[in-house]
Amino acid sequence: MTFARKTRFDRSVSQYRALLRSLARSLILEGTISTTESKAKALRPFVERLVTYAKKNTLASRRLTKMRLGDTVATKKLFDVIGPRYVDRQGGYTRVVKRTKRGANDARKLAYIAFV
């Protein structure tokens, strides 16, 4: 029996998690990043869950976020700056904006992902 699962961009599970972790760190530290559309769509639920943890602001949520991000600087910014900004918001903390294609040789669809 075959089960449907999300795409992992032709990577192993550990490489996929490392990709999401790296993209999430960049997004938290920079505020907006440019990547492919499919990576931005895969990153959105990962980051939104982290922001939900940051809204709670408990020790357990800090530890979970630190474990998932693996970066103390990004975790601190998430809990001190980004989390309090969305206390009254019920979800939808990020926005994916599609960009034009790069060129004739590269047909990847690009997008920006940013905090709202």
Image (cartoon, rainbow, N blue to C red):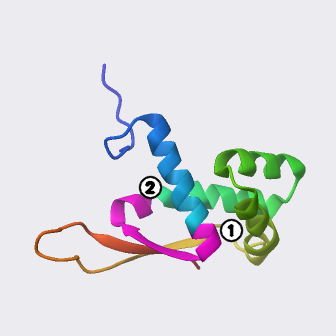
Residue identifier under label 2: 42
Q: Quadrant of residue 93?
A: bottom right
Can residue 92 be seen at all in this image of the molecule? no
| Residue located 51% across and 44% down the image | 17
Q: Which amino acid, by three-letter code, is at mark 2?
A: Ala
| Residue located 45% across and 44% down the image | 16
Q: Is residue 46 left or right of 4 when viewed as pictured?
A: right
Q: Which mark is residue 19?
A: none
| Residue located 39% across and 43% down the image | 6
Location of residue 3 in the rendering, given as x and y in whole percent from the top left corner: 35, 28
The magenta stretch spans which residues? 27-41
Q: Which amino acid, by three-letter code, is at mark 1?
A: Gln
- Viewer-nearest residue: 107 or 1: 107
Location of residue 33 in the rendering, given as x and y in whole percent from the top left corner: 48, 73
Q: Is residue 98 above or below residue 25?
A: below
Main secondary structure found in the magenta portion = helix
**Viewer-side label of 1, 2:** 2
Location of residue 44 in the rendering, given as x and y in whole percent from the top left corner: 51, 61
Q: Is 18 a magenta residue?
A: no
Q: Secondary structure at mark 2?
A: helix
Q: Quadrant of residue 46?
A: bottom right
